[in-house]
Amino acid sequence: MTQDYIEKNKDKFLNELFEFIKIPSVSADIKFKQEVLKAASFLEENLIKIGADNVQVFQTLGYPIVYADKIIDPNLPTILVYGHYDVQPADPYELWDSDPFNPVVKKTKIHPQGAIFARGACDDKGQMFMHLKAFEAMYKSNELYCNVKFMFEGEEEVGSSNLEKFVRSNIDLLKADVVLVSDTGIINNSTPSICVGLRGLSYVEVEVTGPNRDLHSGLYGGAVANPINVLSKMIASLHNENGTINIPGFYNDVIQVSNSDRKEMAKAPFNLEEYQSDLSIKEVYGEEGFTTNERNSIRPTLDVNGIWGGYIGEGAKTVLPSKASAKISMRLVPNQKSTNITNLFETHFKKIAPNYVKVKVTPHHGGEGVVIPTDFPAYLAAKKAMETTFGKTPIPVRSGGSIPIVPMFEEVLGLKTILLGFGLDSDVIHSPNEHFGLFNFYKGIETIPCFYKNYAEIMASEK
Ligand code: BES
Ligand code: MN
Ligand code: MN
């Protein structure tokens, strides 16, 4: 039986995951190019080993897309599993308590059974690997109830720029009934949830230039505008007193969530005191009139992700810099269009620039938000699967993160996605000491086969 196979192979699964995690597949940094390619080869080999057919590594203009499938019966529904084998950069290295690419299991308060500490442990290697191992368990136990197609990319953390083209040119190959992704989270280990919303993203870099060269801040200071001072002031002006964003037209396409939906969302357990103490902050801050969970899910935001310029080395250097820059992300809610928001930002930012500086705005990757219904077969199958493995009905939750390929799947393939993730917000993905609970890893491997079984049943009953 599938669950027996899982029970017997827990250590093997974990050891294999460790081998996968040890490959530093950082897509953002070209220094790691060979490693990213190695991660793709690792997947190729593992897919062959576990019995998948048609295993192919598709080259793209960037990193390859690894594909495999198992079509056991054309009359059964087909699940398209998506995941990403690339990870975020590990730096700053000095803030890690252990080597980011040498996974170790440590117990924590939240993970008393232990958690795997490593870059990519949760986002997304640990989570995507659950799907390979769940498949292995189902297939080896002769209990695979759906056809499955795997599609793994190596560029999610840098904007998935080659995935859409691949999908558009392989529509037949990717034909399926639903997309299944584990790259989100649950509320906590005793409160299962299913992610039913993601925010969109508009990401820009701005550069403010003053004088044509760095100047002596004594000889010129006071007489020539300092680009860092100017940029700071411009950035500060992007929010109003009440926390709303001060860009004309920014909220035009925002759909207000109804009061009854807000009431429903507020039922998810949340403890503000714990939230604040976990972050060592005395008070939360955000848009007036919305709760913390609303601010980070159903409302758009604007945040500076990085800001630089001038002298930042040891000691003091008296300089009036020529340039100042910042990276700015705007999280968008469904119905806001990322290209439109980027344009609004650019127009506004140039408009508020004083005459004594020049401004350059460079758009980076972005994507649209999405809302997932809670009344279609795949949601019901996922809900029932979690009821079986957690013993509780999962709560539908909208997340603040972004996975821009999800709306693309709907547009290009006409497929809805089910976001069956098992991470926790406290797993600190993208940060030092990222981790993934062993409980979560194994719970995922146990829940996925239940999803397949329920999905096959529900789809058969609808025929
Ligand atoms: N897996 C995350 C997104 C995520 C995490 C969504 C947790 C919901 C809950 C994904 O890998 C990610 O980091 N996405 C980026 C956007 C992307 C375009 C680089 C993000 O949200 O910042
Ligand atoms: Mn991810
Ligand atoms: Mn990520």
Image: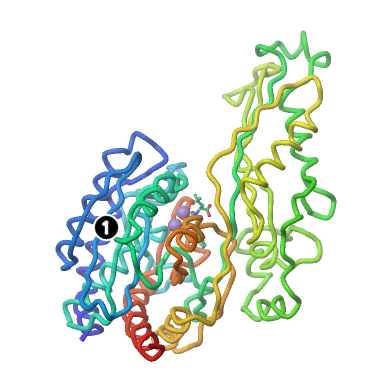
Judge left or right: residue 73 versus residue 221: left
* Residue, far bottom: 461
At 68% from the left and 41% from the top, the residue drawn is: 343
Residue 326 location (% of width, % of height): 63, 35
Color style of the picture = rainbow
Residue 434 location (% of width, % of height): 44, 56
Where's the N terminus, which quadrant?
A: bottom left
Please identify the quarter of the rendering in which residue 261 is found. Answer: bottom right
Amino acid type shown at disc 1: Tyr
Image vertical order of residue 433 relative to residue 290, above or below:
above
Residue 299 location (% of width, % of height): 70, 61
Where's the C terminus, which quadrant?
A: bottom left
Residue 51 or residue 75, whichever sits in front: 75
Residue 289 location (% of width, % of height): 81, 66
Image vertical order of residue 276 relative to residue 347, above or below:
below
Image vertical order of residue 421 relative to residue 58, above or below:
below
What kind of element bears circle 1?
Answer: strand
Q: Which residue is mark 1?
A: 67
Q: Is residue 361 visible?
A: yes
Mark 1 within 8 Å of ligand 2, using the beta carbon: no
Residue 369 or residue 401, whichever sits in front: 369
Task: Answer few, some or many: residues within 10 Å of disc 1's Cα (few below 14, many 20 plus, some between 14 and 19).
Answer: many
Please identify the quarter of the rendering in which residue 120 is found. Answer: bottom left
Judge left or right: residue 68 versus residue 252: left
At 25% from the left and 84% from the top, the residue drawn is: 3
At 74% from the left and 60% from the top, the residue drawn is: 283
- The count of marks equals 1
At 21% from the left and 50% from the top, the residue drawn is: 41
